[in-house]
Amino acid sequence: MANITVRNMRSFSVFTKFTFCKLYSVTQTTNNPMNILLIGSGGREHALAYGLHASPSTNNLYAFPGNPGMRGITTIVDSLSLNDSATITAFCHHNSIDLVIVGPEAPLVKGLADDVRKNGIAVFGPSAKAARIESSKGFSKDLMKKYGIPTAGYERFTQEQSHEAHAYVNDRALPIVIKADGLAAGKGVIIAETHHEAHEAIDEIFSGLFADAGSSIVIEDFLKGEEASVFAITDGNSAVLLAPAQDHKRAKDGDLGKNTGGMGAYAPAPIVTEAVMQRVQDEIVEPMLKAMREEGYPFVGCLFVGLMIENGRPSVVEFNCRFGDPETQAVLSVFQGDLAKLLNSAAIGALDASAMESRAKGFACNVVMASGGYPDAYETGHTIIGLGKVSEIQNVRVFHAGTKALSDGSIVTAGGRVLGICGLGETLAEAIDNAYNGLIDIHYPHRYYRTDIGKKGLNVTNP
Ligand code: AMP
Ligand code: GLY
């Protein structure tokens, strides 16, 4: 139902915009609704598709490779190759694509944004050089140190320096954090409670546990506090900060169990007060953008700032070069404004802050439904029932993350994180209730979810 309303609204606004542009001829071309290609297939991209579909600035929206949840709000394209950017640029030229939005980090790190941009097409997403802030933790730490951006103290070691790494941890306070330098699917971080664990972690990483990602390491002091994620939409010069969110990375309730890609998120997170947001803008985002400009690789896209906040003081745990997952599902569900216009303005180097009317209307809580066993081994191919019923519930959005459509029309599980059930509400408590009421009717064998997503945001009185 909600989709139909949004579609009708969009068609109307597209029509009026089109008429307006015709009247005011070519000087208004930037106001023409755009043809957009969205790259990615997860819950994050489904949430982006949802927001772009609702944007008055969107004309045709394509998704590659997309997912079954995006049908009806995008045209799914399956004939391209992420390893061959020429297929993507050819598609863009053929379909008059105005803007390409890249969701995941891997293609950005490989240079997809550079390749597409070289062909004269606007891209929301950083160059390969700028994406190193995610693909090399050491690189990102060195940049923060050089430009005085608050983060934990650290040292870097290569495999050849393993002796020095072991000696270094002996002198440091516990706990201590050992990180593989490269991309390790969120698994390359070990928080050692004892020196013995720290030595083991160094040996494990250097023995090839994370392949090339572990050929060098960062050893970092432990930061105390509460974690939060802030997304800065930037054209490389200035930035618009979206609603702050909190992820839940551990597999089990109470932040216990193994680290996962994220079991749920909510926004806005009250721990990130307006005063903290201002500090994030002044002490982290702006200095980082300036640093990247000065170093010769300006960052265009979504700068993900992973924060630790202690007594109202934010420090950087990590930077990522793209939107977070599952935070985006909550952040974009409360966003008010024209998402396509905002992202395009960043991509063309003319950030239009007025495209965001407000960071947040109400609250959103996105609960991830996973396959039993995740983040370890899990089964796939189980039929999911109840999706139709949930789509009729007001104030609940279902985002597909790991699903597949079969030729008989059924939808089956196809990943560790299967769905995100996102409840909306005027209060956080209402958003949480709506999310959990929504997922009651969704069934598949061995479904698993945390029962405490968003609870840490209730009763935040003295951040
Ligand atoms: P990262 O991949 O760097 O974001 O690290 C994954 C997770 O490890 C973070 O979300 C934190 O929960 C934790 N972590 C990483 N670095 C630190 C640190 N210096 N102090 C405390 N916790 C950390
Ligand atoms: N939710 C954490 C991430 O996207 O890296």
Image (spheres, rainbow, N blue to C red):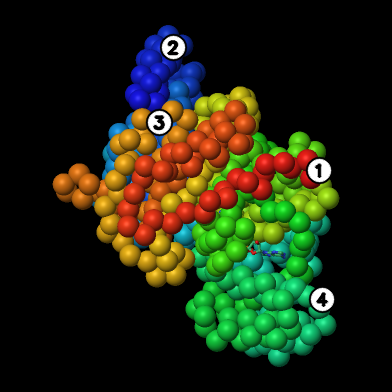
Q: Earlier in the sequence, mark 2 or mark 3?
A: 2
Image-based side of 114 in relation to 406, left or right:
right
Q: Nearer the viewer, residue 72 or 19?
A: 72
Q: Earlier in the sequence, mark 4 or mark 2?
A: 2
Name the spot of residue 400 as percent of width and height, x first. Answer: 38, 46
Q: Earlier in the sequence, mark 1 or mark 2?
A: 2
Q: Which residue is mark 3?
A: 393
* Three-letter amino acid code at the position of disc 3: Ile
Q: Element under label 1?
A: loop
Q: Which residue is mark 1?
A: 462
* Three-letter amino acid code at the position of disc 2: Phe
Q: Earlier in the sequence, mark 1 or mark 4?
A: 4
Q: Which residue is mark 4?
A: 173
Gap between marks 2 and 3 measured at Cα: 36 Å
Q: Earlier in the sequence, mark 1 or mark 3?
A: 3
Q: Nearer the viewer, residue 236 or 59?
A: 59
* Three-letter amino acid code at the position of disc 1: Asn
Using a 10 Å C-alpha cutoff, classify the residue at mark 3 as few (fewer than 14 neighbours), some (14 to 19) or many (20 or more). Answer: some
**Farthest-out residue, top:** 23
Task: Determine contact: label 1, label 3, CB under 8 Å.
Answer: no
Using a 10 Å C-alpha cutoff, classify the residue at mark 4 as few (fewer than 14 neighbours), some (14 to 19) or many (20 or more). Answer: few
Gap between marks 1 and 4 measured at Cα: 28 Å
Gap between marks 4 and 3 measured at Cα: 51 Å
* Three-letter amino acid code at the position of disc 4: Ala
Gap between marks 1 and 2 measured at Cα: 49 Å
